[in-house]
């Protein structure tokens, strides 16, 4: 159908409002399509094909994303536990170094504040 034919059908002011008007408009469009040599069955087949293609695409994306998760790399639980302990030890050492740096800076700030207070007095 041409754009002009579609506009003529959609601008029909004799159509009732609401759901009934929509059904009648769809019916007129199907009749116009059939008059041009098409069949309403082709419309339904194309809709079903589109829906099926969308479903298959979504299924493929879902399966692809499902397999992207982390994989277990340890066969021996004892080895995995040892690795976790090692990581926690490294984290603990880093936290301890951070606490030492904070304590040193606190001491330095305190001594500087005492010097400033003595100067002010």
Image: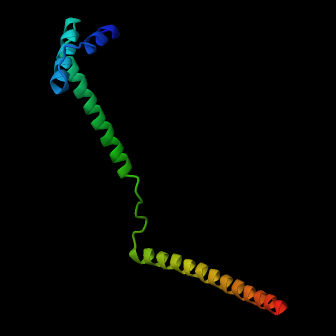
* x, y percent for residue 118: 82, 93
How many marks are shown on the rendered structure?
Answer: 0
Looking at the image, which is closer to me, 111 or 14? Answer: 14
The quarter of the picture where residue 49 lies is: top left
The quarter of the picture where residue 18 lies is: top left
Residue pushed farthest front?
Answer: 121
57 to the left or right of 89: left
118 to the left or right of 100: right
Q: Residue at x 41, y 78 (%)?
A: 78
Residue pushed farthest top?
Answer: 36
Q: Residue at x 16, y 18 (%)?
A: 24
Residue pushed farthest left?
Answer: 20
96 to the left or right of 116: left
Looking at the image, which is closer to me, 48 or 31? Answer: 31
* x, y percent for residue 5: 29, 8
* x, y percent for residue 35: 20, 6
Display colour scheme: rainbow
**Quarter of the rendering occupied by the C terminus:** bottom right
The quarter of the picture where residue 106 lies is: bottom right
**Quarter of the rendering occupied by the N terminus:** top left
Q: Residue at x 22, y 28 (%)?
A: 48
* x, y percent for residue 60: 33, 41
Looking at the image, which is closer to me, 22 or 103? Answer: 22
């Amino acid at each position: 159908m041409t754009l002009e034919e579609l506009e003529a059908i959609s601008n029909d002011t004799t159509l009732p409002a609401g759901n009934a008007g929509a059904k009648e408009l769809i019916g007129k469009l199907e009749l116009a399509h059939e008059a041009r040599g098409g069949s309403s069955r082709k419309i339904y087949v194309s809709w079903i094909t589109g829906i099926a293609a969308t479903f298959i695409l979504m299924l493929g994306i879902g399966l692809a994303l499902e397999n992207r998760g982390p994989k277990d790399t340890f066969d021996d639980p004892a080895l995995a536990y040892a690795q976790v302990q090692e990581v926690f030890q490294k984290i603990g050492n880093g936290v301890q170094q951070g606490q030492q740096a904070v304590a040193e800076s606190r001491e330095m700030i305190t001594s500087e504040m005492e010097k400033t207070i003595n100067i002010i007095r």
